[in-house]
Image (cartoon, helix red, strand yellow):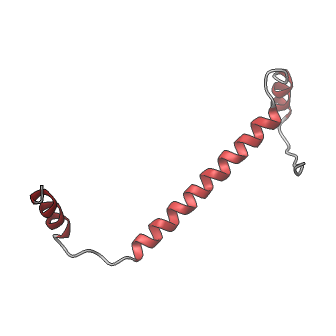
Amino acid sequence: MGNVISIRVPPEIKHEMDRLKGEVNWSEEIREFIKRRIKEYKKRKALQEVVAYIQTLPEAPKGTAQKLVREDRDSH
């Protein structure tokens, strides 16, 4: 069994949730939303870490990309 959390919502939201109670499993909806949000934050953090790492790498000498493309093209 998991932990229990509670939230406060405005009365009009609660009223709408009650009206949809038979159609929507609010607990499951909220659990899935939280899971998606956690996944998004983890991806964002990983991307920030990769960008920070890339910024620490030395710059390639000017013309390196052209040279590599030319070498690859000529090898075919």
Image quadrant holding the C terminus, namely bottom left
Residue 47 drawn above or below residue 28: below
Residue 72 picture quarter: bottom left
Residue 7 drawn above or below residue 29: below
Locate residue 71, reporting x and y percent: 13, 64
Name the residue at the front extreme: 76
Residue 8 lies left or right of residue 41; in this view the side is right
Residue 33 drawn above or below residue 71: above
Residue 2 lies left or right of residue 39; in this view the side is right
Task: Identify the residue shown where x is 60% and y is 51%.
Answer: 40
Task: Identify the residue shown where x is 50% and y is 60%.
Answer: 47
Q: Nearer the viewer, residue 46 or 18?
A: 46
Number of marks in picture: 0
Q: Nearer the viewer, residue 75 or 40?
A: 75
Residue 60 lies left or right of residue 51; in this view the side is left
Residue 12 lies left or right of residue 63; in this view the side is right
Locate residue 34, reporting x and y percent: 72, 46
Locate residue 20, reporting x and y percent: 81, 22
Residue 57 picture quarter: bottom left
Task: Identify the residue shown where x is 79% and y is 26%.
Answer: 24
Locate residue 21, reporting x and y percent: 85, 24
